[in-house]
Image (cartoon, rainbow, N blue to C red):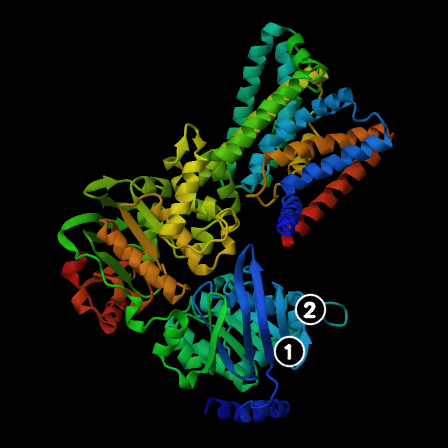
Amino acid sequence: MSNRQNGGRTVSTAALLKQCTENAQVMVYVILLVLLLLAQILSPGYLKPSHVAGILRLASFMGIAAIGQNLTILTGGIDLSIANTITFANIIGAQLMMGRDENMLKAFLAVIVMGLVIGTVNGAGIRFLKIPPFIMTLGVGTVVQGIFLIYTKGAPKGNAAPFLRSICGQSMFGIISGIVIFWLIFAVAAVIILKKTPYGRKIYSVGINEQAARFSGIHTGWMIFSVYMLSAVIAAIAGFLLVGYTGTSFLDVGTSYNTKTIAAVIIGGTAISGGKGGYLGTVAGAVIMTVLDDFLTIVSIPEAGRQIMQGVIILMLVLIYSREKKK
Amino acid sequence: MRNLDGYLRSARNGAEIIKGGYILSDNKGKEPLLKMENITKRFAGITALDQVSFSCEKGEVHILAGENGAGKSTILKILSGIHQADSGEITWKGQKVTIKDPQQSQKLGIAMVYQELTLVGEMTVAENIFLNQEPTKPFGGINQKEIKRRIQEIMDRYGIHIDPDVIVNTLPVAQQQMAEILKILIRDPELIILDEPTSALAKKEVEQLYAIVRNLTAMGKTIIFISHRLEELFALGDRITVFKDGHYVGTRKMKEIDEEELIRMMVGRSLENIFPPALCAPEPDKIIFEVSDLTDSEGKLNHISFQVQKGEVLGIAGLQGHGQSELLNAISGLYNLTGGKVMVNGQKVTVKNAGQAIANGIALVPADRKNQGLMLELSNRHNLAVSSMKKRMKGPFIDKKAESSFVEDMVKRLAIKIGNVELPVSSLSGGNQQKVVLGKELATEPKVILFDEPTRGIDVEAKREFYTIMHQLAADGVAVIMNSSDMMEIIGMSDRVMVMYEGRITGILKKEELNEELIMQYAMGLQKNEEEAGA
């Protein structure tokens, strides 16, 4: 009897281990854990609560913007207009707020409208004109950049409302920043929508086989339109929240977010070809990206070195995932 | 006779004489080319192969038969290095080998022509054939002359006719298949595996393929051939090995076995029982589905009108590409119409997209299950549930419990052989995959169900199950329409048959008058049944 029990346990541990290595969504958390332990060993005190809270706060913006990226990539597309959407939202937000709480709602609504417009253009181009997402969003992103350069004449004005600043500040709830709570809410919503609603199921369907999705009664055109819409609106919200962090606006505040969000999604185990993965892994992906940047800064590796190492690490992870898939 | 003939032909080629000795000596006491013994393979709890054995003599056409899920594909994938056996032994020309990957299998001289074509559509036939192994000129350029010469040589040798400079995409499927075979022959393999090569071919093209296969064996090549078409097995095979449910059933000489025995080996049932009896009689005065004047902009559909009676199975026959699939797709909202109307139970419905068609009670089991029917890499659960998610909601969320019990019920109802509902649907055999497509459609509780080539490439047993379900649906008052290029199926299943030619209905035939020749006359536009056809 005891023999059989032992056998059973071995099997289940082995199965668990197998699941971990096969499921990129699980593996990314293992990688995150290893990374954090490594950081703690090399730089004692790295894992103290206040520092972890700081990392999460930094990761929040990337994490939120990555929701939209995650949706577009799951449908088999990509959104390369996220970076400039974030910057433009940041500029509009700061300019309309002018550092006053009473302007916040107005600024927020304006930013949402901007997101809706960008999303509509992206969605319409991809859906109706059948322009590949890569080209469409890249083009729209560039146009947005042109527009905000004209709008600001190269010198953005305005600054964050005190309330927004407090949300994004060091500690709204104990040591946790308000923005982290925001991210948590967004993350829970994203995971639930993807896992538990027909909308989520349809996203996976479209991503894995658009024709079969259409034959199954899914309105694939609308699905594709809607994810670009969501992506732009979410990026706009991220850009708005970012004003609270930066205080004022500047012209390249969002520039790095295209690569950051794509990296977070891919590191998080979502297949770049679409249809596989999910947001849970992306959360870890965003934290990994932040920790890498942060830790390499702490051990005083210059910006150029950090970028090289980040690039190499992303490539390594993608390599590991694709090897897993082949088995 | 064929072997002797083969010997004589190969005798022209000096090198083949010695190898030809295998053929003449009737293989007694000789080491077979390939021997696979006690092969076992498990996938996620399902035993796909249980201690099966299989061997091939040089120069023969060896048929591998069995229902879907019998393990044919699995053993061939082991042979071609895609899967590795859990246990068992492979002997190749008297040497024990382990085949670790496809490259190794290729090196041994084993080549497989897959059901799915693997050519790059945008390239020419010649470019595809020499992809990655282009002969080069001294300075690194591609030696086009050498390519032409070698292709011509192979085509002459095996009697293949195809223009090597044509872009693959522009070729019909049959020609693409020839190109695929050509691509393999350039490597000069000894053993060639053809996995259901005829499932997408018309009769004349099948004949061409037969001729090529015969040429190949005459040259001393060995063929393993998988097919579900009985007549084909007898026309081509020297020997046959039958698998059933992952077990080895037996190997016979084709000359010493008849259809009856073969079917018994495969399913344990005789031929007459393939088409089950209808469960009810059609009621001619009760029209439950009707279309009138369906027309598109491309001329694929010309003023199509027909009706479906309660309790009947309406067959659609015709040569390939005369608008049958377009008609079914149009009714399901997947093909644009410029005019006409669709009526379900006397109510006019709009079918602008598939979602709308489903909402109006029209379901389609499409012809191409891999591209249109299934999301292969997603789970069985996902695939079964995806068209009917709205039926199992808890507020805005999917009711996982209701879904689980729905999936369980459907798996039971259709007897789908499934290891785990969370595994990708690609893990199932072809027949079971097709059942998942059907389950997905039945879940929408259709009033009209359209089957487009429902049993293409699935085994006798699964076919029979499909037929039973169709009769059951008809008896339940669902309008059942079936398009099929399998004449036996059309005659065996339909209460009435509507024949299409160039996007028109040339005739609607009653059950009593159904025979193959009559249907062909209508299908080739030689006869018209004006009064029935309306237009």
- Residue A130 point in image, percent of width and height: 50, 42
Q: Is mark 2 on a helix, strand or loop?
A: loop
Q: Which one is nearer the viewer's eye here, B69 or A127?
A: B69
| The N terminus of chain B lies in quadrant | bottom left
Q: In this view, does B108 lie above or below B395?
A: below
The nearer-to-camera label among 1 and 2 is 1
Indicate which disc residue B92 carries: 1
- Residue A60 point in image, percent of width and height: 67, 25
Q: Is residue B100 left or right of residue B442?
A: right
Structural crowding at the residue carrying mark 1, measured as other residues with C-alpha within 10 Å and reported as few (<14), some (14–19) or many (≥20) = some
Q: What residue type is labelled 1?
A: Trp
Q: Is residue B99 above or below residue B439?
A: below
- Residue B492 point in image, percent of width and height: 26, 66
Indicate which disc residue B142 carries: 2
Furthest residue toward left: B285
Indicate which disc residue B495 carries: none
Name which of mark 1 and mark 2 comes first in the sequence.
Answer: 1
Residue under the point 74% across and 45% down? A316
| The C terminus of chain B lies in quadrant | bottom left
User: Which quarter of the picture shows residue A41?
Assistant: top right
Residue at mark 1: chain: B
Q: Can residue B396 be seen in this view?
A: yes
Q: What residue type is labelled 2?
A: Ile
Q: What element carries label 1?
A: strand
